[in-house]
Amino acid sequence: QHAHPARRPVTVPVEEEEEAEDDRPAAVLPGRITGTIIDRRSGAPAPGIRVQIGDTFVVSDGNGNYDRNGVVPGNYTVALVLGEGQGEAAQGPIEVTIASGETVVQHLAFFSPLAQATATAAPTTPATTATPLATVPAVATAAPPPTAVPVPEELPATGGESPVALTLFLIGFGIFTIGLMVRSLKIGPFSGILLARLFQRRCRQRGVCTNWRLFCSSCRTTQSYHEVLMVCEVVA
């Protein structure tokens, strides 16, 4: 029998295997971008706001948070996309770098528009139509005829020119004159009788007075007073 030679073991250097493993490329893990959108006007989180991350768009949830998972590591632009009436951004686009497996938190802010006061129109009062009043035709009334004022034919007597006043004045003046004559002449009984009868006749004609004591009273200062008084009593 032929003897077979023994096989020599082949040895592989360990160092070469380790070096081969280190040369393999490392696994790339996706990253994440998240944040909260704040309304600077009210200070509260804002839901329903669009955010652009690279070429992708996301919308904030009810708590104002936006989130994008599975982002390939690299550089991205993050910006708010505000619609009409939502306001304006408080910052411009932001550049963000994402590493493998990294989570980047980037908060965003904006200013909501000012609340405009709504003018409340005052209630309009319906116009009321005035009811025209019935027109009463004017009735022409004839003016009363002028009344003639009666004019007296003669003006009434008003004083000094009346006959009665003149008569009384003359009688008084005559009595005064006779009294002066009796005092100055100191008449006797015959003269007293004559004057008494004369005056009696005059007074009866005038119808003024027949009381001879009025005449005799003017002779009280004369010496023939009592004689004239007796004559007056007899005549009366």
Image (cartoon, grey):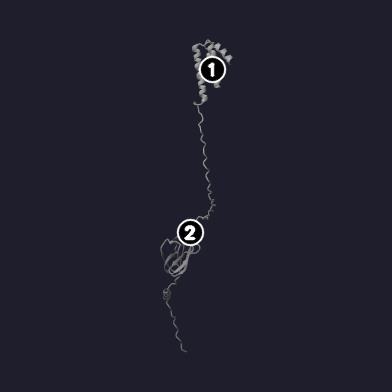
Where is 10 relative to 141, above or below? below
Which residue is tagged 1? 199
In depth, the one of 173 and 13 nearer the eye is: 173
- In the image, taking residue 111 as reference, residue 213 lies left or right, namely right
Q: SS of the residue at dot 2?
A: strand
In depth, the one of 121 and 14 nearer the eye is: 121
In depth, the one of 12 and 220 nearer the eye is: 220
Q: Amino acid at mark 1?
A: Phe
Q: Amino acid at mark 2?
A: Ala
Q: Which mark is residue 207?
A: none
Q: Position of residue 129 (x, y in %)?
A: 53, 55
Other residues around mark 1 within 10 Å, as few (<14) / some (14–19) / many (≥20): some
Q: Position of residue 93 (x, y in %)?
A: 41, 64
Where is 95 relative to 188, above or below? below
Q: SS of the residue at dot 1?
A: helix
In depth, the one of 85 and 232 nearer the eye is: 232
Say whether marks 1 and 2 touch (CB < 8 Å). no
Query: Which numbered disc, 1 or 2, marks the residue closer to the eye?
Result: 1
Q: Position of residue 50 (x, y in %)?
A: 46, 65
Q: Position of residue 60 (x, y in %)?
A: 48, 64
Which residue is tagged 2? 44
Q: CA distance from mark 1 to mark 2?
A: 143 Å
| Quadrant, the C terminus | top right
- In the image, taking residue 126 as reference, residue 53 lies left or right, namely left
Q: Residue at 55% across / 18% down in the picture? A: 201
Query: Which of disc 2 and disc 1 is earlier in sequence?
Result: 2
